[in-house]
Amino acid sequence: MGDEIKLRVSKIEKSFPGVKALDKIDFSVRKGTVHALCGENGAGKSTLMKIINGIYKPDAGEIFIDEEPVKIKDPIKARSLGIAMIAQELNYVPEMSVEENIFLGRLPADKFGRVKWGEVRSRTLQLLQDEHLPYKPTDKLKMLTTSDIQMLEIMKAISNDASIIVMDEPTSSITQKEVELLFKKIDILRAKGCAIVYISHKMDEVFRIADDITVFRDGTVVKSMRAADTNIDEVIALMVGRRMENVYPKEDIEIGEPLLEVENLRSGQLFENVNFHVNKGEIVGFAGLVGAGRTEVMRCLFGLDPIDGGTVKVHGEEIKVKCASDSIKHGMVMLSEDRRRYGIIPMRSVRENASLSSLEKFFYGGTAHPKKEAEVVGMYFDKMSVKTPTQETAIQSLSGGNQQKVLLAKWMMRDPEVLILDEPTRGIDVGAKFEIYKLMTEVAQAGKAVVMVSSELPELIGMCDRIYVMCEGHIAGELQKDEFSQEAIMMYATGTHSIIKEEI
Amino acid sequence: MKSGKVGQVMSKYSIFFVLLVMILISMLLNENFLSTRNITNIAVQLSVATILAYGEMVLIVSGLLDLSSGAVLALAGVLSVSAYKSTGNLALAVAVSIGVAVAFNMINALFVANFAMPAFIVTLATQMAARGLALLYTKGQNILQIGDYAKLGQGSIGPIPIPVIFMIAATIVIWYIMNHTKLGRSFYAIGGNEEASIASGINVAKSKYKAFLINGVLVGIAGVLFMARVNAGLPNGALGYEMEGLTAAIVGGTSFSGGVGTTSGTLIGSFIIGCLNNIMNLQGVDAYVQQVVKGGIIVAAVLYDIRFKNKKAPKVILQKKDAPSAKA
């Protein structure tokens, strides 16, 4: 496509109290191209996108569309200028139906304000049919899976006749198959002449889809370049300001006797006949498509959902888990995939969040020991390089990666025997990912057991000693280290051989 | 940086400044406002509402609520007065009041914690039931001539009136629970995010029972003080007092979405309302006008509090530029 500039920002600046979030940003997107924004969490990508979408006002600088200066005072104005945004955090009303959600804020109405429900219904049906989503327009959104909601969100944005589309981490919770679908859509949009801004931490995706790449660091643009002229290593180096020697700090650790043994675990319709074990010093991965039952197994194991049958042994001793506090008592802890729902207490301080599962260490003898609490929390924060202004800061104001590290600190404080991590690196930046990998290695080195559920195959292959693959509620296969390959994992995960060629 | 620090202090204590400004204005309007007698008067008048407000604060912080406290206070109070009249035992009378209020709160807790019913609905129902029982028991009649029982509300120990002593004691105990115990920490956690608390190993049901238990004890004490102050057992007394308690807690910065609220804030909230009532009485403001003014001032105070907090605490705080040094 041509070199015609669709969207250009010039000398954009934005400060929040105490922090300069964006410093003289220059950046432009060509018509009919995909422009990827890379950078660690907190580098300023999302802030810039929020300015383009009219959510924030810039302190200085100008925005041009088709080289005409524009003022974007709110998201409604942004929409009228042909800007569509797919936010990182899904925005939907769970109690409303599919059609109501799709047309939220832009229901077609006649001059008396009556909604044209017929039109809403037919357009929704069309959209659902086009995207092969097996839902009725009247289904409530809370019945949909996360990945379907994400797809719907994407479809909603691009069905809007937008000429500039911002996608902030669009693939963070959709399956590989849907990623392919999304990429096909993007190709169509690109051919139509749309300018697409694509924010992602997934480098392989960036290099598959992007025409141009701009790297952000600490609120400035480090470099803009053609994707063809660069490579993954260079982009990562620009992002973190140094070369990453080894993305996966996995070390060879002597594998000991079984620490966690799970036999015939079963729960209603979700999964059955689940058998696996994790040895001392071992990192065991769980692969599978979204919805294969991996998260469900871990939730039952940890005591968040009831178990219908089966035995769980830690150090050879059978344990009965009725609730999370039971498994925590036995040294088994779990980092949930849904940080906002099952992880953080948003408005409370990072300190309180970190000490929440070790309260007996700081409250004894009839009183609190705040000094000791601050010391211990500070020690774990240092160890995991948690970046927070103070320990009093509310956890909701930290970046995702730092929130995740605070939650990990919470569990490390209990010195766990079994550490279960469900999608621990989803949506967090390269630097924080590396810290989490390092921590996993340390835990394994101490002779403990680590279980990692992940949808990112390179991460599983890079970090694990063994991988179980789940498919439709049962364990479909077990791979030893010398058998690891994306192809082998996908073969078990899909449960068929014929689809594989398409998938990879 | 400097203005940031001042801002932090201001935002932390913003509601306290509201109270200070109110006291200053009251002083200018009426020279008697700051007299020892008037201050003592204010303290006595707001003691019952403050004790109820602590109960509401604990519950709201935990993501709960009690709409029944006024009615339960009346039921506990009339039973207590009646127990005193038939036995002459003051300690027993106090025990009856606390026992009844705790029992009702355990019923609230049962439905809320074990059957996952919303606290709003459950306590609305117990409010009706408790009021009905109070009227049923007294046949709608006030219990008069309650003798020495009234001393609990009207007497003093040294210069300090007994209701104020109870209020101070409640302040200390609640502050201690909220800041120095595991239980307090779990209240903040379950109100802030119940599911995350469960996943962190906190016994949420037990914590909810304990929050209602604390509320029950406070309502029971308030029942004794209320009846003693009015020198009668009033089955129709303390009508709408749960709202007084709720208002004080909310004005004092307790967040209705749970997880946020302090003992000191609630005390200040209660004093703001108490001072407001007092100065309007001193100035001879018409009682109906008083209600309207009160409504306006409460909205203004909370609005100021929210604005100040939001301004100084942006939702998006980005990492500082010199990130490595932030590690240390």
Image: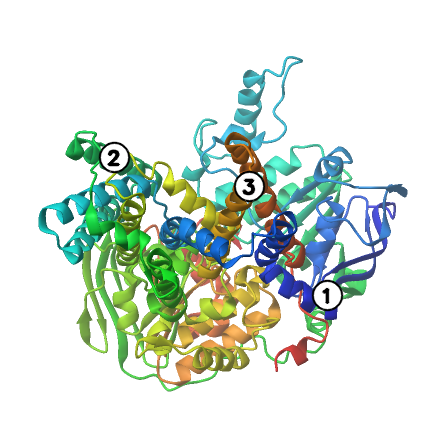
SS under mark 3: helix
Instruction: Tell whether B38 sits left or right of A112.
Output: left
Instruction: Tell whether A228 sits left or right of B262.
Output: right
Give whichever of A184, B191 is nearer the camera: B191
Q: Up-down: is A198 above or below B289? A: below
Q: CA distance from mark 1 to mark 2?
A: 55 Å
Residue A299: give its label. Answer: none
Q: Earlier in the sequence, mark 2 or mark 3?
A: 2
Q: CA distance from mark 2 to mark 3?
A: 31 Å
Q: Nearer the viewer, mark 3 or mark 1?
A: 3
- Tag 1: amino acid: Val
- Tag 3: amino acid: Met
Q: Nearer the viewer, mark 2 or mark 3?
A: 3
Letter of the chain that mark 3 sits on in the rendering: B
- Looking at the image, which residue is at 43% across and 30% down? A139
Q: Up-down: is B109 above or below A156? A: below
- Looking at the image, which residue is at 56% across and 36% down? B285
SS under mark 1: strand
State whether residue A91 appears in this view.
no
Residue A19: give its label. Answer: 1
- On the image, the x and y values in percent for residue B87 come to 9, 50
- Looking at the image, which residue is at 50% across and 56% down? B268
Q: Residue furthest top?
A: A112
- Mark 1: few, some, or many residues within 10 Å (few <14, many ≥20)? some
